[in-house]
Image: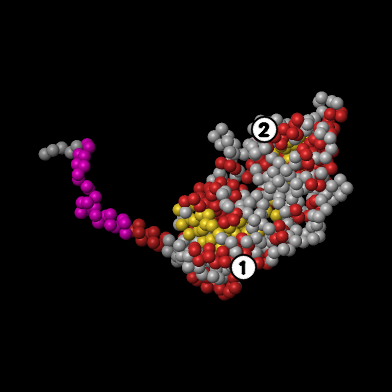
């Protein structure tokens, strides 16, 4: 007899114990019990599961919202067909496939609607859309706290601040392909029709052939926007869905016929020394209105450039993010992160936003207003402030010496664009400083052009330099050197704004004198005068006054500087990008998509182009086509 061993023998590797008959019954019993328990736990009739689910949702939504008081309506989370049926009963005229609108409509039927925020109403969304909506609505951040905001004197603000203009526009009116085609005919440049075909599941981009499109640098922006449409509105743009058309514009400003850009002011008499009426006052006062085109027949225009402050200039324009930033919004929506362009600059990210890392003592900064930039033209239409920009020495009356050039430019003040006016102010300040004859005294402003490489450009600037007129800088100033100055400026260019100058200068330690013009960029909607920046009128008539005020009120100026920098740091956060994506690509874009009415049915792309050309009287060209989710082909490869 073999004695028992302390350690039983090891089973051979080829002997699978769990296949033994005595174990099979045990495994079957355990599996049956576990399956039964899971089915019971998650069954809709199980009250314990309901309570746990409600507890989770009270953690997601604000503390002041009680799920017990407003339980989820099970009939609403059933099927899309039932929800649409309920919507028809609510408002038969506003039938829509947009699930967000369905959620709002359903929430309006529940008690306490008036006390509810967006987060609360969206918990009534259909179950299949819940996770996607949570991506955008999981937080409801309060307005960003602004440091030292309480130090600002309301009386001072009311004395210096320009009258605020309401930038909000009404919701787009219903429109069809006829309005889209008519609107394209009023563009002089960078206007396009973006069309979706449900039959082919393809987006196509059309432009007038006479515009000779060659902006290949914008292809990435077009592609990014189409990808956002695919991702965010997957339920609207899928094979078999109705067609869709919209006008998009990628100009620095809206490049339409000036007769369509109606503005309540008379620009016939330009401001001058004898007529120093401020342009901003003209802009806000009644006057002549240009009405050369029927604006009631214009379709919504998605403007991926600078928009108009006054909505009456172009009522159908919908201001969207700048086209160079569209790739960043695509990165956010697809990857859930902030792009490099709006992240902190570093050794590995030279395209990011520069913040001064060294400790800065505000009162030790150089008390000059500094600007460097090109002599780019200002806007296009005269009724919007468009003015002469290509100044040559021969255009300036007077003797060919510094004093003569300054007097001549001052005489032409009403014809100069804002950047040339800024340089004229700088030349005047240099002459004033020389008269004091003090080596330590610097001019109060330092505004210079940077040379652009164009045919004949260097010869043009040499003419100024040879006559002792320093309108061109000797070299470029990098961000770290800009950070040593107490004041900065961002004078508007072709679109009336400076796309990169505003947010990069707000990030610096000094105060920004922001150039207020008839146009604005999308992120300006979050900026407040005398909180984030000091406003300056379009004609720069109050720049000296604002500078003297900042010098006499260093505490207020420092508070504005720090608030501006804090806002730009906020722009680098996920919270800011969630709010911006929601504002522009959920709310505004959705209102345009919902306004379209596919009245005409076109068999294919050729039939649409033929119909559009018959209405316009000139041919179109296909710029690009995106089929499916990723397959995009552009002009030269079509």
Above-or-below relation of 441 to 545? above
Position of 61 compared to 9: left or right?
right
Question: Dot 2 lies on which element?
Answer: loop
The stretch drawn in magenta includes residue 178: no
At 48% from the left and 55% from the top, the residue drawn is 626
Residue at x 56%, y 64% (from the top left corner): 613
Magenta residues?
6-32
Q: Residues within 10 Å of mark 1 (few under 14, many from 20)?
A: some
Quarter of the image for residue 343 reads top right
Residue 574: give x, y in percent of width and height.
58, 47
Element carrying mark 1: loop
- Residue extending farthest to the top is 439
Q: Which mark is residue 476?
A: 2
Q: How is the image coloured?
A: secondary structure
The numbered dot on residue 269 is none
Q: Is residue 543 visible?
A: yes
The residue tagged 1 is 174
Please tell me which residue lies in front, 296 or 588. 296
């Amino acid at each position: 007899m073999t004695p028992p061993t302390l350690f039983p023998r090891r089973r051979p590797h080829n002997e699978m114990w769990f296949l033994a008959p005595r174990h099979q019954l045990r495994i079957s019993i355990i599996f049956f019990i576990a399956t039964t328990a899971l089915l019971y736990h998650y069954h809709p009739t199980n009250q314990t599961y309901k309570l746990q689910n409600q507890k989770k949702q009270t953690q997601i939504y604000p503390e002041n919202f009680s799920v017990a008081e407003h339980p989820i309506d099970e009939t609403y989370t059933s099927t899309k067909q039932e929800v649409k049926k309920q919507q028809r009963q609510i408002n038969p005229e506003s039938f829509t496939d947009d699930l967000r609108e369905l959620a709002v409509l359903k929430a309006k039927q529940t008690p306490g609607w008036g006390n509810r925020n967006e987060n609360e109403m969206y918990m009534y969304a259909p179950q299949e859309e819940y996770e996607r909506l949570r991506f955008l609505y999981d937080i409801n951040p309060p307005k960003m706290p602004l440091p030292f905001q309480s130090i600002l004197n309301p009386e001072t603000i009311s004395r210096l601040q320009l009258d605020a203009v309401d930038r909000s526009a009404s919701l787009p009116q219903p429109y069809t392909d006829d309005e889209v085609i008519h609107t394209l005919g009023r563009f002089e440049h960078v206007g396009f029709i973006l069309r979706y075909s449900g039959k082919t599941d393809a987006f196509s981009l059309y432009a007038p052939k006479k515009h000779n499109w060659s902006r290949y640098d914008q292809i990435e922006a077009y592609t990014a926007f189409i990808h956002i449409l695919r991702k965010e509105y997957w339920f609207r743009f899928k094979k078999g869905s109705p067609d869709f058309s919209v006008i998009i514009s990628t100009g620095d400003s809206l490049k339409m016929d000036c007769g369509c850009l109606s503005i309540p002011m008379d620009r016939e008499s330009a401001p001058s020394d004898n007529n120093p009426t401020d342009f901003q006052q003209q802009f806000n006062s009644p006057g002549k209105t240009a009405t050369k085109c029927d604006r009631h027949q214009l379709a919504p225009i998605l403007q991926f450039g600078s928009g108009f402050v006054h909505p009456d200039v172009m009522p159908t324009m919908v201001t969207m993010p700048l086209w160079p930033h569209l790739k960043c919004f695509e990165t956010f929506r697809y990857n859930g992160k902030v792009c490099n362009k709006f992240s902190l600059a570093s050794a590995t990210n030279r395209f990011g936003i520069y913040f001064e890392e060294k400790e800065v003592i505000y009162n030790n900064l150089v008390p000059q207003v500094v600007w460097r930039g090109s002599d780019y033209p200002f806007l296009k239409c005269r009724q919007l402030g468009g003015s002469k920009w290509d100044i040559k020495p021969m255009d300036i009356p007077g003797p060919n010496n510094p004093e003569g050039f300054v007097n001549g430019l001052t005489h032409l003040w009403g014809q100069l664009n804002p950047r040339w006016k800024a340089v004229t102010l700088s030349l005047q300040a240099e002459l004033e400083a020389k008269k004091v004859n003090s080596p330590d005294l610097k001019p109060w402003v330092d505004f210079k052009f940077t040379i652009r490489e164009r045919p004949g450009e260097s010869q043009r600037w040499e003419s100024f330099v040879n006559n002792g007129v320093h309108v061109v800088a000797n070299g470029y100033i990098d961000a770290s050197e800009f950070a040593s100055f107490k004041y900065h400026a961002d004078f508007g260019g072709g679109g009336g704004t400076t796309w990169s100058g505003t947010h990069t200068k707000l990030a610096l330690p000094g105060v920004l004198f922001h150039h207020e013009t008839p146009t604005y960029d999308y992120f300006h909607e979050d900026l407040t005068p005398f909180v984030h920046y000091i406003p300056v009128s379009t004609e720069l008539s109050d720049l000296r006054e604002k500078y003297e005020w900042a010098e006499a009120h260093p505490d207020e100026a420092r508070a504005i500087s720090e608030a501006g920098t804090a806002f730009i740091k906020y722009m680098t956060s996920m919270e800011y990008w969630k709010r911006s994506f929601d504002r522009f690509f959920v709310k505004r874009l959705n209102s345009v998509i919902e306004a379209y009415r596919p009245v005409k049915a076109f068999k294919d792309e050729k039939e649409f182009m033929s119909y559009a050309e018959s209405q316009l009287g000139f041919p179109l060209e296909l710029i690009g086509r995106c089929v499916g989710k990723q397959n995009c082909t552009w002009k030269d490869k079509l």
